[in-house]
Image (tube, rainbow, N blue to C red):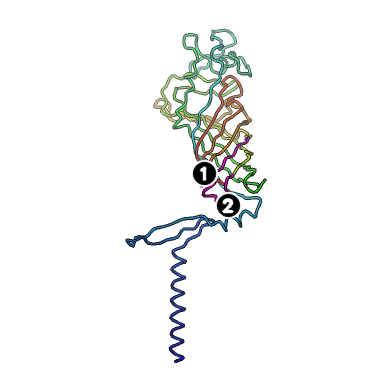
């Protein structure tokens, strides 16, 4: 009798162990996301996912949350407000100097504003070939914006629905030109209309940037079903700039210089999202260049691994 009872208990224990093991295999939890494996009426495997609200409530006990290595991937363009209409017609005079490499004259005037005179100093053209906005047209699909936020933090202000988000990272901007223009480094830097056709012609500029945004989260307990919106300011400092050109005549040519770019960049920044999908946008309030060209860059794309 005792043996039968022991055997029955052992059978029950083994059955419960097998059931628990199967449940452990069929249920996976990654932080607040729970994934359950099951079978449909035809015996095929199906997966269901839901948010663990208990986990979310537990995490909301902390007022400060941190993310490392948040990535942005998007596209660049700019709003061009340069003073083309009042740009002076270039004429040969003693203040011009000759560039023997490219066979071009450039204006030696060092105007440091966004007037027509400064624009002609920065991008000199002959009177028969006036400067137009199309000269600086971008190939938007190839003007890539890639940002790496080394650290991003969210600080609770009110019930986790109102937060402050700030970060430190590097913004990397590629401006792919559709026309055959060339930056000639030096002081002053000039942009000429080149004599060769480039298969690739781009300007690269990277900034060490700190954004600060006010964030609204509609449902912090269920982040997978919440609507989020953030808006704020960002400030960045130019850490590297270079040009890259590829042509049959000259091969691959890289130049590193500041190219008359603004050292400081201040702009509006924001993000919009629902659940795990996040979109970001940036608009510069300071021109891309320090003088001459008055172009205000902007970018838009998706944010990965953000809050």
Q: At x 52% / y 40%, what residue is drawn?
A: 72
Q: At x 59% / y 8%, what residue is drawn?
A: 94
Q: From the viewer's perspective, is residue 49 above or below residue 209? A: below
**Residue 110 placement, left or right of 133:** right
Tell me residue 22's x, y (percent): 43, 68
Question: As rendered, which of 176 and 166 lies closer to the eye?
Answer: 166
Tell me residue 37's x, y (percent): 42, 61
Cα distance in 3D space between marks 1 and 2: 14 Å
Tell me residue 69's x, y (percent): 56, 47
Q: Residue 221: which numbered mark, if any?
A: 2
Q: Earlier in the sequence, mark 1 or mark 2?
A: 2
Which residue, as the protein is rendered here, is positioned at the far right? 157
Q: From the viewer's perspective, is residue 286 above or below residue 279? A: above
Tell me residue 121's x, y (percent): 57, 15
Does residue 174 belong to the magenta stretch? no
Dot 2: within a 10 Å radius of its alpha carbon, few (fewer than 14), some, or many (20 or more) residues? many
Q: Residue 245: which numbered mark, if any?
A: none
Dot 1: within a 10 Å radius of its alpha carbon, few (fewer than 14), some, or many (20 or more) residues? some
Q: Quadrant of residue 38?
A: bottom left
| Helix, strand or loop at mark 1 | strand
Q: Quadrant of residue 142?
A: top left
Question: As rendered, which of 16 and 168 lies closer to the eye?
Answer: 16
Q: At x 66% / y 51%, what residue is drawn?
A: 63
| Helix, strand or loop at mark 2 | loop
Which residue, as the protein is rendered here, is positioned at the far bottom? 1
The residue under label 1 is: 274
Q: Quadrant of residue 247?
A: top left
Which quarter of the rendered picture does the N terminus lie within? bottom left
Range of residues picked out in magenta: 217-233
Question: As rendered, which of 300 and 141 lies closer to the eye?
Answer: 300
Q: How many marks?
A: 2
């Amino acid at each position: 009798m005792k043996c039968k009872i022991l055997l029955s208990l052992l059978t029950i224990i083994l059955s419960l162990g097998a059931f628990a093991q199967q449940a452990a295999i069929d249920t996976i939890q990654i932080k607040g996301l729970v994934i359950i494996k099951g079978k449909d009426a035809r015996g095929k495997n199906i997966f269901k996912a839901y948010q663990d609200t208990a986990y979310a409530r537990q995490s909301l006990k902390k007022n400060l949350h941190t993310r490392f290595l948040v990535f942005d991937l998007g596209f660049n363009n700019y709003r061009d407000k340069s003073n083309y209409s009042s740009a002076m017609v270039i004429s040969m005079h003693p203040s011009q100097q000759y560039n023997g490499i490219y066979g071009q004259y450039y204006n030696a005037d060092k105007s440091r504003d966004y007037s027509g005179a400064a624009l002609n100093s920065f991008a000199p053209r002959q009177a028969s070939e006036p400067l137009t906005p199309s000269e600086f047209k971008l190939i938007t699909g190839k003007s890539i914006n890639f940002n790496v936020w080394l650290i991003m933090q969210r600080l609770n202000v009110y019930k986790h629905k109102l937060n402050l988000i700030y970060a430190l990272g590097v913004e990397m901007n590629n401006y792919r030109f559709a026309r055959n223009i060339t930056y000639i480094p030096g002081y002053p830097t000039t942009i000429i209309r080149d004599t060769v056709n480039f298969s690739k012609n781009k300007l690269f500029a990277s900034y060490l940037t700190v954004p600060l945004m006010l964030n609204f989260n509609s449902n912090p307990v269920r982040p997978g079903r919440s609507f989020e919106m953030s808006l704020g300011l960002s400030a960045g400092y130019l850490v590297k700039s270079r040009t890259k050109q590829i042509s049959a005549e000259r091969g691959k040519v890289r130049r590193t210089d500041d190219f008359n770019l603004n050292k400081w960049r201040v702009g509006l920044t924001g993000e919009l999202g629902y659940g795990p999908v996040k979109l970001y946008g940036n608009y510069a309030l300071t021109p891309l260049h320090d003088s001459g060209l008055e172009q205000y860059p902007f970018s838009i794309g998706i944010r990965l691994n953000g809050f």
